[in-house]
Image (spheres, rainbow, N blue to C red):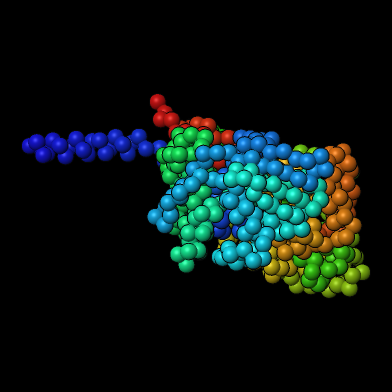
Amino acid sequence: MKKLLHLVMLLCLHATAMAADKTLIFCSEGDPEYFTPAFNGTSTSFDVTGQIYDRLVRFEQGGTQLRPSLAQQWRVSKDGRTYVFSLRRGVKWHSNANFKPTRDVNADDMLFTLGRQWQADHPYRHVTRSRYPYFESLGFAQLLQRVRKLDAYTVEVVLNRPDATFVSTLAMQWAGIQSQEYAQAMLNNQTPELFDQQPIGSGPFQFKSYTRGQEVVFQAFDDYWEGRSKLDHLVFSITPNASERWRKIKAGQCHVMPYPNPADLPEMRRTDGVAMQEKTGVNIGYMAYNTSKPPFTDVRVRRALNMAIDTRRILRQVYKHTALPATNPIPPIQWGYNRNVPEDSYAPAQAMALLKEAGYAKGFSVDLWAMDVQRPYMPDAIAVAKLIQEDLAEIGVRVTVKTHNWSEYFQRARTGEHDMVLYGWTGDNGDPDNFLNTLLSCDAVDGNNLARFCNASYDDLVKKAKTSLDQSERTHLYEQAQLIFKEQAPWLTIAHANQYKVLRAEVKGFHITALGRHWFYGVDLVQQP
């Protein structure tokens, strides 16, 4: 009898502990590309690595103002070329079955994180992969002159030229700091690939497991330097379909979902026990022409197709009036936006005349790539592609719509396999450079510049703006660059979409961010009465 009572008591205690465990389930829209931030190029991946890794600096919750993180403070020389970062002491690393750290975060980790991406002879330069999309697109290899450790917690970075965006660029997710000690241990064990597969960071959540197409599981890090998370566990439930994400929210199988179907918004607003957050998005949805491939080497062809596509119809039928029409490659809420740039006119007859002038009176055949997942800048790329297909058929351009698994889509587009590709961007740091340079510069042709657009006049303007510390001068230069962009038409600009996040009422402390990231430190689950 006593044994039976003891067993009942144990079961009750276990049930109580399970009930007390706070596990938040986030209905993520796709699989991460990699668990090493420097390899990634999508917000889907950065949502995952952002929980694991800290950066030197980060943006304040919900905004674009910089605040210290691993770097407790930093100072910059008068000429804007030398930066000295003083690292926070006492920051602990996670651990796993392969590695137990023996020291805190220090200067060696910052040197490792930058050196891996920069130095051709670095022992980790070609482990797992050899491409670093952000580092390359940002031109960091040409920007950095010297990175050296002044002492165990102080690093000096010397640039070849001033860069007004340097610190805010280090606040981006690609710059998550990794453990040099862990990397060396895996190299010594002759298993360097485990460093990228079993991530260890210093962020609020530790990586526990990943099942492709199903879930990523995290556990709260007890020794996080800002204090333990209010959540015990965090699960990214990978759910590509928006209708299925909404079903899971209603059933209590998920607590937070991004990127709802615009058609579902009215029902979401009137559903009990569900809250919605909304914010103007710092983003752009576009279609890039591969300007390195005929016929898109000819600007007349690109301009003709832009005139043949009714983007207002796309906004009505796909976005359901939840987005602004896009004219420029940066959103109108972004400083530096040029309001004098003319919007593309919908003029199919003029488009046909321009195609004839370019030597394509009978049109041509072309592939259009469309994502198979929803994005913050495009709720249904397949539907957008079909409308574009219909419009271009009217001027004799025969379009075949193709798609690829989301985890491969961006990687393959970066190599220039496509003819035309639907894509988009959510700002990383609140600076126009993050759109105009990162997405359209010559440096970014093998990175985030999916149009493979390289125009000397445009490039000169955005590079000059990057080196100026005067915002009014930078604004003027960016306004000129946007005029060249419109004239050269490397993209069809489609929309600046509003952000919507749907959450259950028991979720407290979740904030929609200006830059569209999903951050779960500070979030709590409170049982409803």
Q: Is residue 276 left or right of residue 351?
A: left
Question: Residue at horizontal 45%, vertical 49%?
Answer: 102
In the current view of this chain or complex, which residue is farthest to the left?
A: 1
- Residue 506 visible (yes or no): yes
| Residue closest to the far right | 357
Where 204 sits versus 134, above or below?
above
Q: Residue 455, percent across and down?
A: 86, 61
Residue at 23 percent across and 35 percent down: it is 12
Where residue 526 sits, quadrant-wise, is top left
Residue 496 placement, left or right of 198: right
Judge left or right: residue 188 versus residue 464.
left
Residue 84 image-quadrant placement: top right
63 or 104, which is in the foreground? 104
Give the number of callouts.
0
- At x 82%, y 62%, the residue is 454
Where is residue 43 shown, x and y percent of the image? 61, 50
| Image coordinates for residue 443, horizontal then vertical, percent | 77, 60
- Residue nearest the observer in this picture, 443 or 353: 443
